[in-house]
């Protein structure tokens, strides 16, 4: 019962947050200078044409009224029509969402694996020069944002060692048999490893750029957690039983050190998703973020609105998942030691 | 006893922190000097175009032109000079945007954390909403709204990143507010505002200073990103972000146009960050 | 022949060279229960840890040998030493609240070493674990095997740890103040349990404690330590009848007795402490001289 109330309260707060986001975006983008309608029409369009289209998109009404109309539409599942594409915003957004999701999730996996490996190696080789080197590398990775890593990767793998692609999501000439927009996922399911390779070749660099800062955070936190755990009595006891250093770390310390790391990773994941906006642009990756930037440049109000709301919803969903996961794993750890 | 027996070389840690502080601070000081004296230090006019001297490589490569140490971009403008002038803008944005964000964010955080009640509810809710926005997108949006120019960028940074200070400062203010020295100050007759400024603020100051260095690094990056996305379309005034945007397009023909501003940006952000880390280590024994 | 032979063991802190153990020698015969007594900081835990190979990172051994069943442990390569110690020795730790992994069930914590290190098959390991848990008088061993540590009380956890220590039939168990962290009411039970199981399994036991009362109940012989140096080494009977060293006598006198709470709280007299410290210093000078002679 208490759990139900907590969940409902959480959903209510989320709704308020999303509403707040919607209002702010709505107001902000309508203050944008530049008439999107005028940008759409060919030069030589009459004032009448402009007025007609403006009315069509409802942009001549007062702002509060526009907002209510928009909310009404949203509750029916209609997020408006894109000014630049003339297609429903919802379709456009859902069309690009899988690409961004796949990129984000790939980055997350890379970050966890990389950061985890760094933390474990650093702990296992504690006190050696290797550990110090890992710490320094970590410090640098932590201090530099995904944007710069993206540029570095573009330079290294675009100019020096051109083994990966630095542009796009997939080689344009390829014939894609996919049903959904989840290219990576589908290529796996369909066992089309040739397509998988092509996709990965395009995705690896942007994913890596996104992953590096998060990997550094994971490594730092996990290493700290492991260090604290390694001093505990049950770890020492395991040593007396004959377990070697590596097994002691992975069997005894790691399961205990993971939980606090997990919650932080969840929060940082939302930052990673936010980073897709610029990384996708940098690598010309056809995802949500790239579309968002174009939308702003073109003053495509309905589209901007839809994308921002979607990102906000995505963030809150991730936060919710993290909190739920923590609550699920926690009772077991309510121990006295 | 147990602490002594861990023997993980705390002494070494302290030494590393000191070195870090010197290196980072040193580099930033150097950048500041370059920025201030750029008009005199720069070998060429950063805006001077000469299409005959376009895409010249840096001095150690074949085909380089003497005087253009780091080469030229596609319009024949000297990369080194543009780099130096770009440092001015970068540091200007870092200082102004960073400080403003810090002031506003900290102020709101202090108010929320100390006064609690309605103030806290409103500010916390605002923070939640703000944090649901994808930051880069929001900043691009704001710059589109406000218009081109440095003011827009600074405002965008402040409006988006104040939450970074507000959250942390709020938490600290709450923690400090619960401590005994505050209660005794109040009992001795200090006003609430007085307590906040005289007792709590000094204790929260180290955290704010560390965040400030972090914020400055972020400000530089945001400026570069916004210029890269080409929303502030003033292609003349040399900024590192603009140079990077140009360099990205001619990456195969003139890699140096991208590399040098990238390295400059990289080092500056790294320095700000390490400065913050170094300060954090320094403040640590005082705080705990 | 003694199963555990420690000869002239010395140890110090890596950082400032503070001596922790000064040429300690002691033996534990097969099936013998030897008490290792001393005040806090005397080095008694250090000896147990040295044998088991779990000295803190900041401590290093500077001399001596540790023979287990005839084999010089310190001469073995790391992995081999770990294996032998894991197979032949066990530890009953001090604090049951922190000595069990909180995220794993009790059962695997007892059976895993049998399967992983000793190569038993899972079924045999579980049978054995259940048997030993039953020996510790825990009601419903099956439930305990499936439980997480936080579901058990301190006394119950200590019984699990005792079971874990005996499960592989070790030749030597080091008990590091196993009752100190427990409630007084539970201490006696646990003590009795350890004594019972030792007698039944015939395991050699090195019982580290600061409590002479415990020694009198459980041990056959004892070694008294002060500042990392052996002060006295004798049988329990002889000790309690007439301790040979003034420090030991003072320790005995300092043991509080319920029958005379006020009168029995006599600290070790300053004169005795001074004398024993002088002894230690003299011994140090001798050691330093020998070291200098060797290097000089």
Image (cartoon, rainbow, N blue to C red):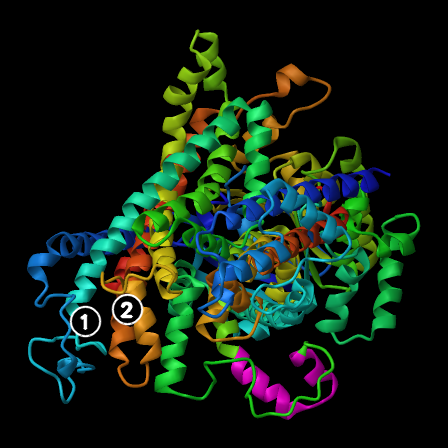
Q: Which residues are magenta?
A: A183-203
In the rendered image, residue C24, in percent from the top left (x then y), is placed at 49, 53
**Residue in view at x 55 percent, y 88 percent:** A172
Query: Is residue A200 a member of the stretch shown in magenta?
Result: yes
Residue placed farthest to the right in the image? C140
Q: Is residue B215 above or below residue A295?
A: above
Chain letter behind tag 1: B
Disc 1 designates what residue? B79
User: Where's residue C42, x and y in %?
Assistant: 50, 42
- Relative to C43, say whether C56 is above or below: below
Q: Residue at x 50, y 70 (%)?
A: A280
Q: CA distance from mark 2 to mark 1?
A: 9 Å
Q: Quadrant of residue A261?
A: bottom right
Front residue of C224/C63: it is C63
Query: Which residue sits at x=13%, y=83%?
Result: B52
x then y, percent, for residue A188:
70, 84
Count of marks placed on residues: 2
Viewer-proximal residue among A236 and C82: A236
Q: Magenta stretch mostly in which secondary structure? A: helix
- Which residue does the numbered mark 2 point to in the structure image? B243
- Quick check: marks 2 and 1 in contact, CB under 8 Å? yes
Secondary structure beneath disc 2? Answer: helix
Question: In which quadrant of the rendered view does residue A241 lie?
Answer: bottom right
Task: Report x, y in % for residue C142.
Answer: 91, 56
- N-terminal label among 2 and 1: 1
C43 relative position to C164: left or right: left
């Amino acid at each position: 019962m208490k759990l139900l109330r907590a969940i409902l309260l959480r959903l209510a707060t989320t709704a308020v947050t999303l509403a707040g986001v919607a209002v702010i975006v709505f107001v902000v983008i309508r203050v944008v200078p530049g008439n999107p309608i005028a940008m759409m029409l060919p030069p030589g369009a009459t004032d009448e044409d402009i007025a007609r289209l403006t009315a069509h998109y409802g942009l001549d009404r007062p702002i509060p009224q526009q907002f209510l109309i928009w909310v009404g539409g949203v509750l029916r599942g209609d997020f408006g029509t894109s000014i630049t594409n003339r297609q429903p915003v919802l379709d456009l957004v859902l069309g690009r969402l899988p690409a961004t999701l796949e990129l984000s999730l790939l980055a997350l996996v890379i970050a966890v694996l990389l950061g985890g490996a760094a933390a474990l190696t650093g702990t296992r080789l504690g006190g050696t020069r290797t550990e110090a080197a890992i710490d320094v590398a970590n410090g640098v990775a932590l201090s530099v944002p995904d944007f710069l890593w993206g540029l570095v990767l573009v330079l290294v793998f675009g100019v020096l060692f051109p083994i990966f692609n630095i542009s796009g999501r997939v080689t344009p000439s390829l014939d894609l048999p996919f049903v959904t927009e989840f290219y990576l996922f589908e290529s796996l399911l369909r066992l089309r490893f040739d397509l998988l390779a092509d996709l990965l070749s395009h995705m690896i660099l942007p994913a890596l750029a996104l992953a590096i800062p998060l990997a550094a955070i994971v490594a730092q936190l996990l290493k700290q957690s492991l260090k604290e755990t390694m001093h505990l009595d049950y770890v020492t006891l395991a040593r007396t039983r004959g377990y070697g250093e590596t097994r002691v770390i992975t069997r005894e310390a790691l399961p205990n050190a993971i939980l606090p790391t997990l919650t932080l990773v969840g929060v940082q994941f939302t930052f990673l998703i936010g980073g897709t906006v610029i990384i996708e642009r940098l690598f010309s990756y056809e995802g949500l973020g790239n579309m968002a930037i174009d939308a702003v440049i073109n003053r495509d109000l309905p589209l901007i609105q839809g994308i921002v709301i979607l990102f906000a919803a995505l963030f809150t969903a991730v936060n919710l998942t993290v909190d739920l996961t923590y609550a699920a794993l926690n009772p077991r750890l309510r121990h006295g030691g | 006893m147990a602490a002594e027996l861990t023997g993980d070389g705390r002494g070494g840690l302290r030494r590393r922190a000191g070195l870090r502080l010197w290196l980072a601070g040193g580099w930033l000081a150097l950048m500041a000097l370059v920025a201030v004296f750029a008009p005199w230090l720069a070998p060429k006019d950063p805006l001077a175009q000469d299409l005959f001297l376009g895409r010249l490589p840096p001095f150690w490569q074949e085909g380089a032109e003497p005087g253009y140490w780091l080469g030229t971009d596609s319009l024949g403008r000297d990369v080194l000079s543009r780099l130096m002038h770009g440092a001015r803008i970068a540091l200007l944005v870092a200082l102004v945007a960073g400080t403003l964000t810090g002031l506003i964010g900290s102020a709101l955080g202090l108010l929320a954390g100390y006064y609690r009640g309605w103030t806290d509810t409103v500010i916390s809710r605002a923070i939640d909403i703000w944090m649901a926005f994808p930051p880069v997108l929001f900043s691009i949006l704001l710059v589109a709204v406000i218009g081109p120019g440095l003011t827009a960028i600074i405002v965008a940074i402040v409006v988006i990143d104040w939450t970074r200070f507000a959250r942390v400062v709020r938490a600290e203010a709450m923690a400090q507010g619960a401590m005994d020295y505050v209660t005794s100050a109040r009992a001795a007759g200090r006003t609430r505002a007085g307590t906040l400024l005289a007792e709590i603020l000094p204790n929260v100051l180290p955290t704010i200073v560390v965040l400030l260095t972090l914020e400055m690094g972020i400000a530089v990056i945001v400026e570069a990103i916004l210029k890269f996305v080409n929303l502030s379309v003033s292609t003349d005034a040399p900024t590192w972000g603009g140079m990077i945007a140009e360099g990205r397009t001619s990456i195969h023909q003139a890699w140096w146009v991208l590399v040098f501003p990238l390295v400059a940006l990289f080092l500056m952000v790294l320095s700000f960050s390490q400065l913050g880390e170094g300060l954090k280590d320094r403040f640590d024994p005082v705080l705990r | 022949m003694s199963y555990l032979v420690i000869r002239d063991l010395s140890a110090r802190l890596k950082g400032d060279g503070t001596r922790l153990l000064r040429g300690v020698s002691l033996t534990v015969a097969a099936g013998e229960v030897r008490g290792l007594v001393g005040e806090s900081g005397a080095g008694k835990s250090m000896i147990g840890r040295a044998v088991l190979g779990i000295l803190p990172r900041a401590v290093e051994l500077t001399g001596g040998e540790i023979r287990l069943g005839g084999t010089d442990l310190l001469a073995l390569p790391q992995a081999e030493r770990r294996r032998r110690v894991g197979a032949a020795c066990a530890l009953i730790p001090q604090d049951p609240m922190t000595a069990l992994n909180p995220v794993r069930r009790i059962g695997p914590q007892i059976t895993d070493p049998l399967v992983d290190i000793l190569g038993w098959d899972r079924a045999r390991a579980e049978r054995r674990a259940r048997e030993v848990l039953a020996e510790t008088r825990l009601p419903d061993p099956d439930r305990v095997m499936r439980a997480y540590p936080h579901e058990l009380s301190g006394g119950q956890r200590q019984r699990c740890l005792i079971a874990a220590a005996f499960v592989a039939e070790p030749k030597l168990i080091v008990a590091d103040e196993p009752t100190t962290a427990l409630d007084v009411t539970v201490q006696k039970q646990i003590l009795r349990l350890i004594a019972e199981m030792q007698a039944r399994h015939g395991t050699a036991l090195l019982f580290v404690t600061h409590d002479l009362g415990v020694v009198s109940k459980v041990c056959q012989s004892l070694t008294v330590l002060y500042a990392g140096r052996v002060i006295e080494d004798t049988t329990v009977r002889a000790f309690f009848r007439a301790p040979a060293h003034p420090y030991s006598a003072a320790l005995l006198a300092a043991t509080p007795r319920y029958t005379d709470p006020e009168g029995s709280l006599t600290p070790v007299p300053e004169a005795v402490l001074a004398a024993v410290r002088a002894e230690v210093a003299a011994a140090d000078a001798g050691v330093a001289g020998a070291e200098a002679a060797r290097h000089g």
